[in-house]
Amino acid sequence: MKTKHKKNSPQKSRGGKILFFLVLIAIGLILVFHQQAFRSVKPLTKRRSTLVERKEVLLYFSDSEEGYLVGEKRKILKKNTVQDEAKETVIELIKGPNGKLIRTLPPRTELLTLQISDAGVARVNFTPALAKDHPGGSSAEMMTVYSIVNSLSVNFPQIRRVQFLIDGKPIATIVGHLSLEQPVSPKPDLIKRQ
């Protein structure tokens, strides 16, 4: 039996060359597209790293005897305005300490709003849980008030005094021992020197 040798027809060899060139073009397009995609994603990753930038603040919680405030460092999200960073600071205070210090705000307390006036008064508006869930006592009330006032004024020099509100209304006191009818100035002598 004779074997027939097929010769490549000119059409088939031309088809192979065309296929080869199409593969090369596809590879070139993929490389170009990949570079362009990388360039367009790069600014997004830069923006994302900016979004998660953090700022260190000093939060004041009570010592075990409720006689002094002790600072605890905490990282908050860096925001565009002092007002937003101050809100983050109060929210971290509500979460309580990470270490052995004593929390100064009842855990169910929520911050509703925080506004800073041109005169440097921060109007801090809480839910009723601030007063309803408060453990009471003059020392505990003093620790609550000054943990907020000192934490805000130490971290944000623009804040010179704090006005306390519950559900948008100024309050006279939290549990009856400390007058809050006027905005409260910081009390640095309550901070324990370490």
Image (cartoon, helix red, strand yellow):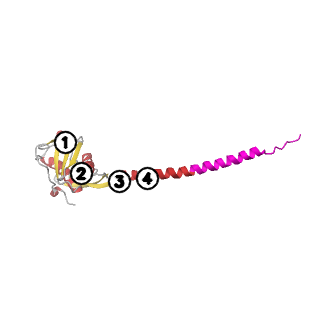
- Mark pair 4, 1: CA separation: 43 Å
Find residue 144 and report its horizontal and vertical position in percent: 18, 48
Nearest to N terminus: mark 3 or mark 2: 3
Give the amino acid at mark 1: Leu
Q: What amino acid type is highlighted by mark number 2?
A: Leu
Marks 3 & 2, CB-CB < 8 Å contact: no
Cα separation between marks 2 and 4:
42 Å
**Alpha carbon of mark 2 to alpha carbon of mark 1: how far?**
19 Å
Is residue 141 at all visible to an observer of this figure? yes
Label 2 sits on residue: 101
Residue where numbered disc 3 is placed: 53
* Nearer the observer, 99 or 143: 143
The secondary structure making up most of the magenta span is helix
Q: Earlier in the sequence, mark 2 or mark 1?
A: 2
Q: Which residues are magenta?
A: 1-30
Under tag 4, what secondary structure? helix
- Extreme-bottom residue of the structure: 194
Report the quarter where the C terminus lies.
bottom left
Residue beneath the point at 22% across and 46% down: 114
Residue pointed to by mark 1: 130
Secondary structure found at label 2 = loop
On screen, residue 7 versus residue 73, left or right, reads right
